[in-house]
Amino acid sequence: MAHQEIEGPWVLDTRELVRRPGTMRTVTRIVEAPEPIGTDVVAIQAGHPVELEVRMESVVEGVLATGTVQAVATGVCVRCLDEVRVDVDVTLQELFAYPDRATHHHQVGADDEQDTQHQLDQDLMDTEEVVRDAVVTTLPFQPVCRDDCPGLCSECGTRLADDPNHQHDVIDPRWSALAEHVYAGDGTDDEKRN
């Protein structure tokens, strides 16, 4: 973590908890998303508020962060392209290891999972990546404005919710030659029979 990031809004100070197992502290703050948190389809947009409530608990290996993230994600309905608002209310739990404990686990050949373990940096905990991971995995993969959204007409793009009886007369391509023959003639019925 760069020195200038130490005072960032996502960074929590754990100095009063470090190396004192059982000590706890809860922090509540509202921060702005620095960039979209989510996917291309639905995300907490940059500059929108994200409410964090994190309980930090000192344990032997480091500091255990447990908390909630609340925000509103916006995007587009994958069926009709209307705007979608998704209330985000996510729980998270992550261990931020002391650097010496993380090094020890790596040296003794602990699981590969330990390689991706988060670490405290100068007794500071940067929660941005943990929040991002927790939020992205809970957002809908294909958001819809409502469960029964009929979407758009595949022929002309009309919004089907506005016109539930919308339809097009579609002729089976196998009969198209016959249709051209029947509708192309200007003659009378007698001429058509001959």
Image (cartoon, grey):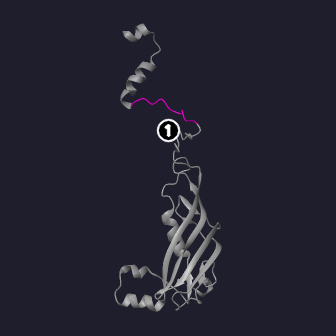
Q: Quadrant of the N terminus?
A: bottom right
191 and 116: which one is in front?
116
The residue located at (41%, 82%) in the rendering is 115
120 sits left or right of 45 in the view: left
Q: Quadrant of the C terminus?
A: top left
Q: Is residue 190 above or below residue 14?
A: above
Q: Position of residue 56 (x, y in %)?
A: 55, 81
The residue located at (55%, 87%) in the rendering is 23
Question: Magenta segment range?
Answer: 163-172
The residue located at (60%, 72%) in the rendering is 52
Q: Position of residue 91 (x, y in %)?
A: 53, 69
Q: Position of residue 28 (x, y in %)?
A: 63, 75
Q: Is residue 90 above or below residue 186?
A: below
Q: Is residue 192 above or below residue 2?
A: above
Quarter where residue 170 is shown: top left
For label 1, the residue is 155
